[in-house]
């Protein structure tokens, strides 16, 4: 390992040490489950905004999105980003304040608990189903983060993929299990800053090496369909393929996923003050738009750099390492640049860790609070409750490592599937629970099961038919789940007067 690699590694290790320290620091502030899972509802507006978006974007922002743009052009990446930007804004606008207020009203500290308390589900059926959905889809989601870490260290230092992936997973599990929600949120806030620095520096350096912005655009313009929003570039054949209106709608459907993301909804529930969420919304929306736009153009710039021989030509899932390759090139310009490269690559880790820690917490809370405590009535002392929560984090981390074992797995594809799962299973019920008084328990259960099941059915059965059926599974699954929820609610008994009273009080802001 040369001096440059050593400097990069030292910078990354220093970053990892910092987040573990934060975990130790906040471990002393966790007095009970409310602190561990929701931070005592005391997140300020900046931390609420940036931790929500950092936990949302994950390694997908710095690896998946630039990789898609690099290999196929603007269409797929841009329409996905547009859908996500709109979804982000609407989620903050219509869901954030309402779910914080409602979760306080019904005394809920997890998303499944909110569903159960909202509908007065005495048998805890809805809470159990929701917890199972969280575990099913968060394990591969967490695994995608571990896989991204393994790819990073393998690409940088030639380190064995599995060793790097396991070490990264252990670090994430340690600080999450120690510090809980406050540690995760604080590190997410710091990581959002590191991620921002990373994409800006990489973008600027890449444009310079590629010969300037005009050279970047000239290279992209020469590729059929690359800069089009209605065509997609086929890198293998060197031709353009039509990007239909149906495909655009399918891709925009990524935005629907926001309404059902437990780790984002928890940030809303944990906000210190409801009125501060307006400021948080503005911060989050601006950051998301700028960061995704820059990430997309890092892919475009990276392709131009390959064109001039500055970095190697990337194919298949290797395109997801384009930011890493640019950072490595930057590190060859002296020791200061090597340290900057370390910070940039720490940004990739930051993007990964900021999502993985939130997912681990949400999944752990589902096992301990929603299944063991609420469903099966297991009684814990405060000390044993905290220990059980931490053990759950470690167990889920283990399963995530198993999912991430294949080094050829695509971060983008794994995230896409898990995102669809939460969007379809939870999105419709969140919206109806908050805004439709007639929605009832039976409809919620039927809609949730339908949404989760349709993700598998559509992706692995119906989509195989091709043509109009080969669309992103989130769109049809979300629509079908919404319809089922409404129809079953109307066909079964209306909510009780007590439930309706709670709904009206929340609506009135009480």
Image (cartoon, rainbow, N blue to C red):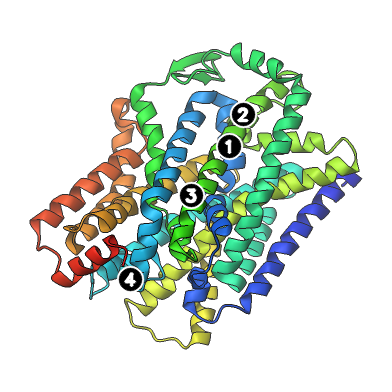
The quarter holding residue 297 reads: top right
Q: Nearer the viewer, mark 3 or mark 2?
A: 3
Q: Nearer the viewer, mark 1 or mark 2?
A: 1
The quarter holding residue 203 reads: top right
Quadrant placement of the C terminus? bottom left
Label 1: element kind: helix
Q: Is residue 382 visible?
A: yes
Q: Which mark is residue 374?
A: none
Q: Are marks 1 and 2 in contact (CB under 8 Å)?
A: no
Q: Judge the density around disc 1: few (<14), some (14-19), many (≥20) Cα neighbours within 10 Å.
A: few
Q: Are marks 3 and 2 in contact (CB under 8 Å)?
A: no
| Nearest to N terminus: mark 4 or mark 3 | 4
Q: Which mark is residue 297?
A: 2
Residue occupying image coordinates x 86% and y 36%: 332
- Distance from disc 1 to disc 4, alpha carbons, whole Å, reads 36 Å
Q: Is residue 379 above or below residue 13?
A: below
Q: Is residue 112 visible?
A: no
Q: Judge the density around disc 2: few (<14), some (14-19), many (≥20) Cα neighbours within 10 Å.
A: many
Q: Residue beneath label 1, please?
A: 290
- Distance from disc 3 to disc 1, alpha carbons, whole Å, reads 14 Å
| Nearest to N terminus: mark 3 or mark 2 | 3
Q: Residue beneath label 4, please?
A: 105
- Distance from disc 1 to disc 2, alpha carbons, whole Å, reads 11 Å
């Amino acid at each position: 390992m040369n001096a440059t690699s050593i400097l990069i590694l030292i910078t990354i290790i220093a970053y990892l040490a910092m987040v573990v320290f934060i975990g130790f620091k906040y471990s002393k502030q966790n007095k009970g489950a409310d602190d561990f899972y929701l931070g005592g509802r005391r997140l300020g507006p900046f931390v609420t905004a940036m931790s929500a978006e950092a936990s949302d974007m994950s390694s997908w922002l710095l690896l998946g999105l630039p990789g898609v743009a690099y290999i196929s052009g603007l269409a797929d990446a841009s329409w996905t980003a547009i859908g996500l930007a709109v979804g982000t804004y609407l989620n903050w606008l219509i869901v954030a304040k309402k779910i914080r207020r409602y979760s306080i009203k019904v005394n809920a500290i997890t998303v499944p608990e909110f569903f159960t308390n909202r509908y007065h589900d005495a048998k805890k059926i809805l809470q159990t189903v929701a917890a199972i959905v969280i575990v099913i889809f968060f394990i591969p989601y967490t695994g995608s983060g571990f896989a991204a870490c393994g790819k990073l260290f393998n690409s940088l230092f030639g380190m064995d993929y599995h060793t790097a992936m396991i070490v990264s997973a252990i670090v994430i599990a340690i600080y999450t299990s120690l510090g809980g929600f406050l540690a995760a949120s604080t590190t997410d806030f710091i990581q959002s800053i590191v991620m921002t620095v990373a994409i800006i520096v990489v973008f600027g350096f890449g444009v310079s090496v590629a010969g300037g912005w005009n050279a970047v655009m000239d290279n992209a313009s020469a590729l059929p369909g690359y800069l089009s929003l209605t065509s997609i570039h086929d890198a293998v054949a060197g031709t353009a393929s039509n990007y239909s209106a149906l495909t655009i709608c399918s891709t925009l459907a990524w935005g629907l996923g926001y309404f059902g993301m437990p780790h984002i909804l928890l940030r809303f529930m944990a906000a210190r003050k409801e009125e501060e969420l307006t400021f948080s919304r503005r911060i989050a929306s601006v950051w998301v738009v700028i960061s995704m736009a820059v990430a997309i153009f890092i892919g475009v710039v990276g392709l131009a750099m390959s064109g001039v021989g500055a970095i190697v030509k990337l194919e298949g899932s290797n395109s997801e390492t384009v930011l890493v390759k640019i950072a490595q090139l930057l590190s060859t310009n002296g020791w200061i640049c090597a340290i900057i490269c370390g910070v940039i690559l720490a940004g990739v880790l930051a993007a990964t860790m900021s999502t993985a820690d939130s997912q681990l917490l949400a999944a752990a809370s589902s096992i301990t609070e929603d299944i063991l405590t609420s469903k099966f009535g297991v009684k814990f002392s405060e000390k044993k409750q905290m220990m059980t929560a931490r053990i759950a984090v470690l167990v889920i981390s283990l399963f995530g490592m198993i999912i991430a074992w294949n080094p050829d797995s695509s971060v983008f594809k794994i995230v896409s599937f898990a995102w669809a799962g939460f969007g379809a299973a939870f999105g419709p019920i969140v919206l109806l629970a908050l805004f439709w008084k007639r929605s009832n328990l039976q409809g919620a259960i039927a809609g949730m099961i339908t949404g989760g099941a349709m993700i598998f059915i559509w992706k692995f059965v119906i989509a195989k038919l091709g043509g109009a059926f080969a669309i992103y599974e989130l769109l049809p699954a979300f629509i079908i789940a919404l319809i089922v929820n409404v129809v079953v609610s109307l066909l079964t008994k209306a909510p009780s007067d007590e439930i309706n009273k709670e709904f009206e009080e929340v609506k009135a802001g009480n």
